[in-house]
Amino acid sequence: MPVLQKILIIFMCCCTLLCFGQDDLAKLNKKEKELIKQEKKIAKEMFEARVKLLEKDQHLKKIHDKIMELHKELSLMLDRKKEMRILVDKMKKVRNSLNTVRDKKRELEPDEEEEEE
């Protein structure tokens, strides 16, 4: 069998394998998208159930309120630390720069109202 025929047969086999692999990949992507959709739906249901339970059960509500109060206290204590103040200041500078860039970008973009006229 000539070398060219062997190469052609190998090429055809590789193409066939690739096609089957792509089909499997498409099925996996579809399955993944469906599972992500289910995951989001269930997460939303869980959140809504938690909210309802906190509204109904006074014991759970008291625990939740205590946790939130402790969280607030912790946040205030952390924000007083020098290390955190430095980071907060850095964040403010970055956000201000970002807002400046976004404002300039808006100025350079043509208004949608002008385009419609």
Image (cartoon, grey):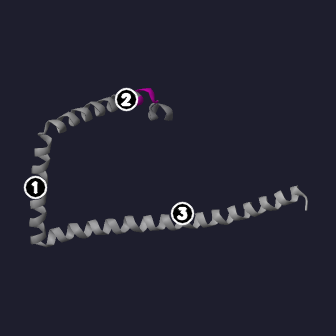
Is 58 located above or below residue 107 in the figure?
below
Distance from Cα at disc 1 to Cα at disc 2:
38 Å
**Left/right of residue 54 with respect to residue 38 in the rendered view:** left
Q: Main secondary structure of the magenta part?
A: helix
Decide which of tag 3 and tag 1 comes sooner along the chain: 3
Which contiguous range is marked in magenta?
A: 105-109
Indicate the quadrant where residue 106 lies. top left
Residue type, numbered disc 3:
Asn
Distance from Cα at disc 3 to Cα at disc 1:
43 Å
* Residue to which mark 1 is pinned: 70
The quarter of the rendered structure image containing the N terminus is bottom right
Indicate the quadrant where residue 89 lies. top left
Distance from Cα at disc 3 to Cα at disc 2:
37 Å
Q: Does residue 117 appear in this view?
A: no
Membership of 27 in magenta stretch: no
**Residue toward you, 72 or 13:** 13
* Residue to which mark 3 is pinned: 29
In percent of width and height, residue 66 lies at 9, 60
**Residue toward you, 90 or 115:** 90
Decide which of tag 3 and tag 2 comes sooner along the chain: 3
- Closer to the observer: label 1 or label 2? 1
Q: Identify the element where label 3 is drawn.
A: helix
Decide which of tag 1 and tag 2 comes sooner along the chain: 1
* Residue to which mark 2 is pinned: 101
Residue type, numbered disc 1:
Leu
**Residue toward you, 64 or 99:** 64
**Left/right of residue 26 with respect to residue 85 in the rendered view:** right
**Residue toward you, 84 or 51:** 84
